[in-house]
Amino acid sequence: MWTRPVVAAAEPGPPGPADGLRQTAACTPPGDDGPGAARGAVPQPPPGLATGAGQLVAVVDTGVAPMPRLAGRLSGGGDYLTGDDGLTDCDGHGSDVALLLAGAADPVTGLGAGIAPGARILSLRQSSGRFAVRGPDGAERPAGEIRTLAAAIDRAVALGASVVNVSEVVCVPSALVDAAGAALREAVDGAERAGVLVVAAAGNVDGSGTCTGDPDLRPLPASYDTVVAVGAVDGDDVPGDFSVPGPWVDLAAPGQDLPRPSGPAGAVVRGTSYSAPLVAGTAALLRERFPMLTPRQVADRLRATARPTAGDGRTGHGVLDPEAALTAEPLLLVPDEPGGRAGVPGAGRAPLPLAPATPPDLPVVAGVGAVAAAGGALVAALAGLRRRARRS
């Protein structure tokens, strides 16, 4: 059986408050995730195969607020804005991501569960549109930068996460990727070496001069080859026109007009930010059900079992299919070219039998916006590349 490698590096210490932090808008915390939230919009795998139990999934985002549907399964990994514990969310974005990923079902209706309701969530607050910091050029920008995004991924790995969800994006010209994103590249590569799968939103075409769909712009960390990049589709598997296309997109998941998990009835969210946690949650299910698989083998199963669709560069190998990911044989799958389903073990690798479908013990539960680079800040990018908070 494959076992997670021992990470030799020392654990990154808890983050301190950001330099020059200033609150620019009042906090708008998430709702109380009351009855009707998410209303069954999240695709559900067959019962009895996996719930994500035993898996710690890091959510690097705007923070995750304590909520009844995450009771007993939420912990704070740190706050790169205020130096707190990561359990404050002024934007509501990170909390919605966490509920889509691992929220428990509504206790009255039984609906609205996240895709991996048995998983534990580790929250690291790394960005917010409600705070500003002063960059190297003296200009104020919404809080969050590549350096702290890399540090948050490193810390998530050190704290024992098996999957990291990043519903944040910075789009930079290809010529600046190596210099501006060096620390981030090392963080995602280090995660893979440590046996941790990183899943990231592909980003939104926002028309602001950042993520525009220009083929010369690379979304980070989505475009790194060790990251599973996720685009967005609607309920009919039609790609969202806002979903950033590119050859790095691995697969897509629902991300258009989803009922907002922490919002009132009728509130919806839209973006690749909300597609990514559905894939990250499925990865947690796979890591529970098939603990012998490496991160790359888990990523291969996600791609190989995706439903083929014409995605125009927005859906990669197709649309997430949790049931197929959990049940397809053989165990080791190699993805076909985008648009096709695979089912052939890799050259020189013998097929492994599927693990038996033994129902796990269910836990007792009490109760994507992409962050885009500031368009005019690319000169300052090499000194830190502050990023404008923008939901994906």
Image (cartoon, rainbow, N blue to C red):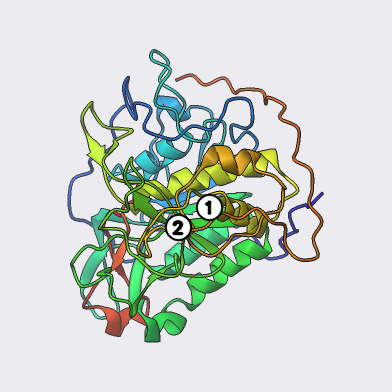
Q: Could you tell me residue 235's position as x and y percent?
A: 33, 40
Q: Residue at x 47, y 52 (%)?
A: 308
Task: Name the residue nearer the viewer: 14 or 107.
Answer: 107
Residue at 41% x, 37% y: name it.
Answer: 100
At x 25%, y 57%, the residue is 241
The image quadrant where one finds the C terminus is: bottom left
Q: In the drawing, does residue 324 fall left or right of residue 174? A: right
Q: Which mark is residue 200?
A: 2
Q: Is residue 105 above or below residue 188?
A: above
Q: Compare marks 2 and 1 and give the one earlier in the sequence.
A: 1
| Picture mark count | 2
| Nearer to us in this view, 315 or 7 | 315
- Say if mark 2 contacts mark 1, CB within 8 Å: no
Residue 366 picture location, percent across and down? 48, 19
Can you tell which quarter of the image residue 215 is in?
A: bottom left
Camera-side residue: 200 or 88?
A: 200
Closer to the camera in the image, 217 or 248: 248
- The spot of residue 198 in percent (x, y) is 54, 57
Q: Which residue has dot 1 on it?
A: 164
